[in-house]
Image (cartoon, grey):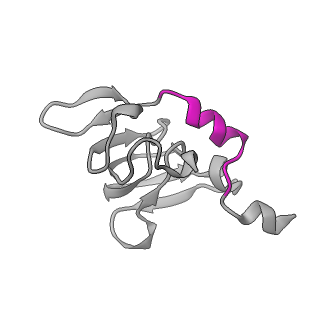
Amino acid sequence: MAEGRGKAQPTLCARRARRLRLAAWRAAVRSKTIPSSKLRAGDTVVVAACEFIPGDGEVIEGVASVDESAITGNLRPVIRESGGDRSAVTGGTKVLSDEIKIRITSNPGETFLDA
């Protein structure tokens, strides 16, 4: 049973997150809120504490504690930071502290939650 929980599978929370219309800040010359369904690979967003990560991506600036329990089942938050092997983030997870800038790496319909 523990082995099954350890594998990355979308949970009930992840399936609910997939249906949510998450909003994200597009980090451009003029920041604005847009629906996550409009984000494309290469777009850059800023996600602050208590906000959900709108899509799969890579942290390009900042360090934050992220709750990935909806995806992994692990109740402990993880640290995500730019560079190195701890920069990948999954859409639908929640930033618990600080603020990170993320480069989206997948288009709608191609994310981990869509699998």
Q: Position of residue 52 (x, y in %)?
A: 49, 38
Among all residues in the image, which is located at the extreme bottom? 84
* In-front residue for pair 40/54: 40
Q: Which residue is drawn at 54% across and 52% down?
A: 112
Q: Which residue is drawn at 77% across and 60% down?
A: 5
Residue at the spot x=48%, y=49% of the render?
Answer: 111
Q: Which of the 4 image quadrants contains residue 73? A: bottom right
**Chief secondary structure of the magenta span?**
helix
Between 77 and 113, the one lying in front of the other is: 113
Q: Does the magenta stretch include residue 12?
A: yes
Q: Of all residues shown, which one is farthest toward the right?
A: 1
x, y percentage for residue 93?
Answer: 54, 45
Q: Which of 48 and 43 is in front in this view?
A: 43
Q: How many numbered markers are drawn?
A: 0
Residue 8 lies left or right of residue 47; in this view the side is right
Q: In which quarter of the image is residue 14?
A: top right
Left or right? Give the position of 19 relative to 57: right
Q: In this view, does 1 lie above or below 37?
A: below
In this picture, residue 65 sits left or right of residue 101: right
Q: In this view, does 94 lie above or below 8?
A: above
Q: Does the magenta stretch include residue 96?
A: no
- Could you say where residue 32 lies in the image, as x and y percent from the top left? 25, 27
Q: What stretch is highlighted in magenta?
A: 9-21
Query: Quarter holding the N terminus?
Result: bottom right
Looking at the image, residue 42 sits to the left or right of residue 111; the answer is left
**Where residue 82 sits in the image (x, y, percent)?**
34, 63
